[in-house]
Image (tube, grey):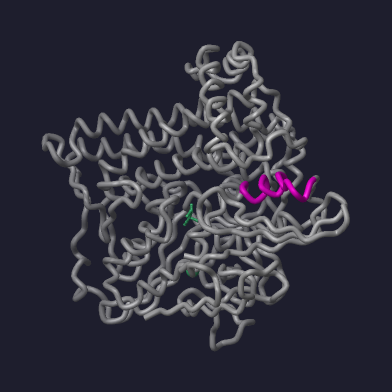
Amino acid sequence: MASERIVIDPITRIEGHLRIELEADNGRIGDAWACATQFRGIERVLQGRDPRDAWAFAQRICGVCTGVHAIASIRAVEDATKCKIPPCAELIRDLVSGMATLQDHVMHFYHLHALDWVDVMSALKADPAATSRLAASVSPWPNNSATWYAEVQKRVAASAEGGLGIFSGGYWGHPAYRLPPEANLMALAHYLEALSWQRDIIRLHTIFAGKNPHPNYLVGGMGCSINLNNQITVNQVRLDEMAGMIDQAKRFVLEVYYPDVLAIASFYPDYAAIGASSPNLMATGESAWSCSGAPAGGVFPAALLMDGNYGTAHPFESKRVAEFVSSAWYSQPEGDRQGLHPWQGRTEPRYTGPKPPFKQLSDHPKYTWCKAPRYDGRAVQVGPNARIMVAVAQGHAETVQLAKEGLGKLHAGIEALNSTLGRTYCRALESVILARRMDQWFAQLNERIKSGDTATFNKERWEPSSWPKQAQGMGFMEAARGTLSHWIEIENGRIARYQAVVPSTWNSSGRDPGGQRGPYEEALAGGGKHPLLDAKRPLEVLRTIHSFDPCISCAVHVLVPGGGGVEVKVR
Ligand code: NFE
Ligand code: MG
């Protein structure tokens, strides 16, 4: 294939607007640009408001990683106002975010990513009895009869006759699909099962936090009250129901999701060496997964791996974070080369790109709505693979053992976790750890309740009169897609400045003033070896970009109907 420019827009199935522009030559990608084509501006909406209300606005940044922005927000406010929350509230927050992450990871794999590896049309040719035998050989999951697989084929075939519905538009039959028909059918059946599973397990949110998506939070604790005998609060009946949901969540992760990922990965071992991205990886902890200092116990402290040295963890220092706008449609009086720490950060949208219709955005220095966060000037990868690699580097025994087992099956070393397959595998691996952690947190909560400790709210810092006149706070959270941080400045009881630095902002960022690519771009263009067989059906690119689980709503945090010049008016 001669050198050509390729545009994939949109590249995600849901979760905002991401456009990938590429240069490709002879079946290989030469260069790549990630363009976030949506501006949301929630940071500006928050200015001037009561900090105790911020979480409710902030979590509307996204409904996929539901709740995570609320947690980061209340943590930032609690940090600024020096508010400590009761242990039961911390455990409930961990359980709510833990369940959201499990739901998010499973849905990402089956509903947003698996069909990059699984050919739906091939599944229709599978032998249901052979599929049943295959399923029994990889997992004790009971739903594996030949009758069930024949039923799945019938349902999907009916959908195919009607134009395929949710399965339309795939690159079915592409030579890069490698699973035998039976493995395709097994995964497809689990795709359908995961739909009802995720609906059932997330009801835990409705009990602890009133609703889902966008559960309710509270600065100083959680809004639910615990009374074992009361009918309308968190009582014994509800706790028993939630124990069932946690068990259901764990079984699907251990018996379906994790074995499926390992089984599928075994057909695509070369993807452990494709899609390597920035060799700097960061996990900041203080979260459901690694809540250093929280009652559930820390898993590992916040740290970074630098320059491809995956054996040494460097402590995280918040002062080293800065966001750049040299490739993004924002203006700042300091000039485009200047990175701003989030406590000095600004969000001043100024679209300078071409008017539609246009062929490409990346022929201009500014080509995205996504700012470019950097740590100590370096592009940094965040997400499940960063968390796993940082935990392994710090010798976290459970993670080390699981990673060793999984990498052994894939015949790969730790460096393989920085790859397309590595990112997808680490999401499943951390789900196993998280499912176990849910059991522990739930047991700890029950113990506390039994001992009579049922407090869920600390009102000492509720009144603004108890706050300093001027205060800054930061709230961290390991969201499903990686490290999330919210940064707040409070003046006279109101929000003076608010910045969110989000996992997909780290990963989908464009070039910085030094010309460093962001992690999506680097994963495609880094070594100049990323395959692309057919420019008209860029399946391999989907694999690598989807392995990050992009969320552009999160990353950019106003659409102009009909296109034309973009005029963003903010009060
Ligand atoms: Ni909308 Fe979100 C956040 C991102 S993380 S998905 O924060 O990126 O899971
Ligand atoms: Mg931001």
Which quarter shows the C terminus? bottom left
Q: Is residue 519 above or below residue 95?
A: below
**Per the image, is 282 magenta?**
no
Give how far across and how far down residue 267 sits, in percent.
72, 30
The residue at the far left in this view is: 230
Residue depicted at x 27% and y 50% = 89
Give how far across and how far down residue 52 sits, in percent.
27, 66
**Does residue 242 appear to the left or right of 377 in the view shown?**
left
Chain part drawn in magenta: 534-547
Q: Is residue 471 above or below residue 232?
A: below
**Does residue 218 appear to the left or right of 501 in the view shown?**
left
Q: Nearer the viewer, residue 340 or 271?
A: 271
Q: Nearer the viewer, residue 300 or 340?
A: 340
**Per the image, is 545 magenta?**
yes
Give how far across and how far down residue 382 sits, in percent.
58, 55
Tell me, yes or no, if residue 398 can be seen here.
Answer: no
**Does residue 560 appear to the left or right of 425 in the view shown?**
left
Give the image quarter of residue 220. Answer: bottom left
Tell me, yes or no, if residue 239 can be seen here.
Answer: yes
Give how far across and how far down residue 90 sits, in percent.
32, 50
